[in-house]
């Protein structure tokens, strides 16, 4: 790991865009959650991360009293839980969409504002626009720094791990639809929720779509006349992925099966799945 990802250190990656990595590295989070600080005289914080007082203090110190907005891309527990603590420390309003019912979400997230698709906040005359991107999570939004063409992509697009889709809140059709929306935007760069900044957004998005469709073709090919459960399908669909990641891959596998079921390709049968 390069020292660029040293937790707690604010690193400027372009004028007015800094990143502080939280201390939560892991298979899903890469080096840790990226907390982004956008703006100079007025600062928006995107995804303050898990509750970690030291990380919040690093954000407050880097903000130098200029933090005006606290934004959450979604309410998975590695992104939004520190919003409340950061609001207490700065007085800035929290903007994001409430957690839906169901597990794996930060149900304590209490936004001051729930952004609509296309709504923007202003920082020194620069616009940060909300782009609704359901799929990884139903309440997921990306934030576009319009004048820089820079997309803060949360977990919708990641630096070097493939986003996991967790049904029923996560949905593969929504995910691919959101990627298609993003593909139509004039993007110049992507600042993801985990991992390094990405250039060539069109190539990144096309690669993600191709990866998902290739995986889906493997799922489809693995289905037979006899029902097979998720654990039985994993080795043939995810044989190229380290076994330690199969527990995570199960979720995305289910998301593909649900999409194939809608298209009349797959059928549920008891605990298993078979060809329709
Ligand atoms: Zn997430």
Image (spheres, rainbow, N blue to C red):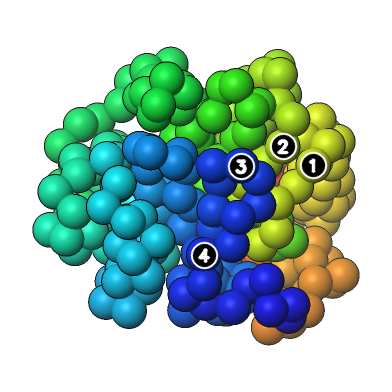
Q: Who is closer to the viewer here, 143 or 41? A: 41
Crowd rating for badge 3 (residues with CA inside 10 Å; few <14, some 14–19, many 20+): few
Q: Are marks 1 and 2 in contact (CB under 8 Å)?
A: yes
Determine whether, in the image, residue 111 is placed left or right of residue 140: left
Residue at (33% x, 20% y) in the render: 116
In this view of the protein, which residue sits in the foreground, 192 or 104? 192
Mark 2 secondary-structure assignment: strand
Q: How far is disc 3 from disc 2 in space, using C-alphas?
A: 13 Å
Residue 29 point in image, percent of width and height: 56, 69
Residue underneath mark 2: 189
Assess whether mark 3 and mark 4 are in contact (beta carbons under 8 angstroms): no
**Residue in the picture at 82% in, 46% down:** 211
Q: Please name the residue that numbered disc 1 is placed on.
A: 199
Q: Secondary structure at mark 1?
A: loop
Q: Earlier in the sequence, mark 3 or mark 2?
A: 3
Mark 2, residues whose alpha carbon is within 10 Å: few (<14), some, or many (≥20)?
Answer: many
Left or right for 176, reference 85: right
Q: Earlier in the sequence, mark 2 or mark 4?
A: 4
Instruction: Please identify the quarter of the rendering in which residue 85 is found.
Output: bottom left
The 10 Å Cα crowd at callout 4, few under 14, some 14 to 19, many 20 or more, is many
| Residue 232: quadrant of the picture | bottom right
């Amino acid at each position: 790991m390069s020292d660029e990802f040293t937790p707690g250190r604010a690193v400027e990656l372009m004028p007015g865009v800094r990143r502080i990595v939280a201390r939560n590295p892991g298979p899903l989070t890469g080096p840790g959650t990226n907390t982004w600080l956008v703006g100079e005289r007025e600062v928006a914080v995107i995804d303050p991360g898990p509750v970690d007082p030291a990380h919040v203090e690093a954000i407050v110190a880097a903000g130098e009293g200029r933090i005006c907005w606290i934004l959450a891309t979604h309410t998975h527990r590695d992104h939004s839980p520190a919003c409340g603590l950061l609001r207490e420390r700065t007085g800035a309003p929290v903007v994001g969409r409430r957690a839906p019912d169901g597990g794996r979400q930060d149900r304590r997230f209490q936004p001051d504002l729930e952004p609509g698709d296309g709504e923007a906040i202003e920082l020194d005359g620069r616009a940060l626009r909300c782009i609704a991107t359901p799929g990884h999570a139903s309440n997921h939004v990306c934030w576009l720094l319009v004048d820089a063409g820079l997309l803060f992509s949360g977990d919708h697009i990641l630096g070097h791990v493939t986003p996991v889709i967790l049904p029923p809140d996560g949905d593969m059709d929504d995910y691919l639809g959101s990627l298609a929306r993003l593909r139509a935007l004039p993007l110049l760069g992507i600042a993801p929720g985990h991992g390094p900044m990405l250039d060539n957004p069109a190539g990144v998005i096309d690669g993600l779509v191709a990866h998902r469709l290739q995986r889906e073709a493997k799922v489809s090919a693995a289905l037979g006349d006899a029902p097979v459960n998720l654990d039985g399908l994993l080795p043939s669909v995810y044989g190229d992925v380290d076994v330690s990641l199969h527990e995570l891959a199960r979720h995305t596998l289910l998301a593909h099966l649900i999409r194939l079921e809608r298209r009349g390709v797959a059928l549920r049968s008891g605990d298993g799945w078979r060809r329709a």
